[in-house]
Image (tube, rainbow, N blue to C red):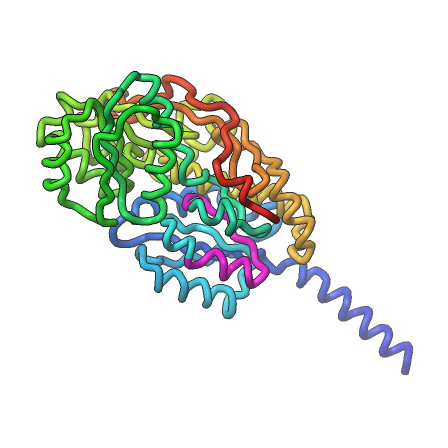
Amino acid sequence: MKKMIFSTVAALTLMSAPAMAAEPVKIGMITTLSGGGSSLGIDIRDGFQLAVDMRGGMLGDRKVELIIADDARKVGNAKQIADRMLKRDKVDIMTGIVWSNLALAVVPDVTKAGKFYLSPNAGPSKLAGKGCHMNYFNVAWQNDNLHEAAGQYVNDKSHKNVYIMAPNYPAGKDALAGFKRYYKGKIAGEVYTKLGQVDYAAELANLRAAKPDAVFFFLPGGMGINFVKQYAQAGLNKSTPLYGPAFSFDEGILKAVGDTALGVFNTSQWNKDIKNAANIDFVSNFHKTYGRFPSLYASQGFDTALLLDSAIRAVDGDMSKTDLFRDALRAAKFQSVRGPFRFGPNHHPIQDIYVREVYKDGDNITNKIVGKVFSSHGDAYAADCKM
């Protein structure tokens, strides 16, 4: 009888081992797929999905189940989806959020539940400083970074009186704080617009009256499209140069605004003309798969998947090895499409940041790198992070 029991247990053990091994790693992606700003979320999703598809539906040689949900850029939606993914879907990892106000509402709940959150975009200062967490990693930037580079570049261009604008939400406030950290001239006006705003007539009238010698703005997605068009319609592009971060001049915005953006300089940690093997492969496969060139957001989705690929492989697909998995994420042993990449002590990137110029490549309006503003640039909040 004892022999039979032992044989049965042994048989069950042999049967359950491959079954357990076959269980996929569950990744919950909450992102914006409808309404204002949906192009950003679509690009993040498509970049991430491409990396998974290029690896045969696997990351780290382990099958993944990607559960995708649309937050429609609403905090309430994001919180409800996150709760469902944690409690019902039992995800191992979460990612995808575009907007900083949504990230601030969701990330603390995810990390409190003992799960990992990898940000492919939103990098609010609160989560980089005192609100940092050992299970939170940002694979894109800290919100201030590209704006800091823009401030430095505008300073280097000898502009003395700059008008600055951003939406009134956490990333907008971080943006202008970052710009002012490196720009040393006079601020002709500092304006915070409504998130999702489409009409900038009043702001443009005030801007004209202020008579700045340059304008710096951060208005991602459809906000940027409307602003750039209205700026040109007001004739201001002929007298007052525009500067911004990559978010204001990504591929989607340039396709919509056309020639009015030609000659504008913007800052980014990535561009499709970066010459490394990972980026060349990414740009080619993205264009072949989706019929469009990748944006900055797509590159960040792709890199997030590459980081996960490296960390899952490091623990042989065993997600119960929480400490080792965290160490593997922190090590960031993957070939980023942007080139050199490492994490600072608050799990935010230390990376090069470039200046790009909008130009015409045949019939395509796009960006090219024309210089480097910062090398191995970190963020201003790391010292406040205590893990």
Residue 273 vertical position relative to residue 38 in the rendered view, above or below: above
Residue 306 visible in the picture:
no
Relative to residue 2, is residue 328 drawn left or right?
left
Residue 365, relative to residue 325: is it above or below?
A: above
Q: Position of residue 211 (x, y in %)?
A: 14, 26
Describe residue 339's horizontal placement relative to residue 258 as left or right. Answer: right
Could you tell me how many numbered marks the image carries? 0
Image check: 208 left or right of 69?
left
Q: Which residues are magenta?
A: 105-122
Percent x, y of residue 336: 52, 33
* Residue 8 visible within the image: yes
Q: Residue furthest front?
A: 186
Q: Nearer the viewer, residue 306 or 289?
A: 306
Residue 298 image offset from top left, x and y in percent: 40, 39
Q: Quadrant of the N terminus?
A: bottom right
Farthest residue to the bottom: give it.
Answer: 1
Image position, residue 47 (x, y; %): 42, 42
Q: Is residue 237 magenta?
A: no
Residue 111 lies in the magenta stretch: yes
* Residue at left offset 62%, top offset 36%: 333
Q: Residue at x 54, y 55 (%)?
A: 93
Q: Residue at x 33, y 21 (%)?
A: 155
Q: Closest to the observer: 59 or 207?
A: 207
7 vs 180, left or right, is: right
Q: Residue at x 41, y 51 (%)?
A: 97
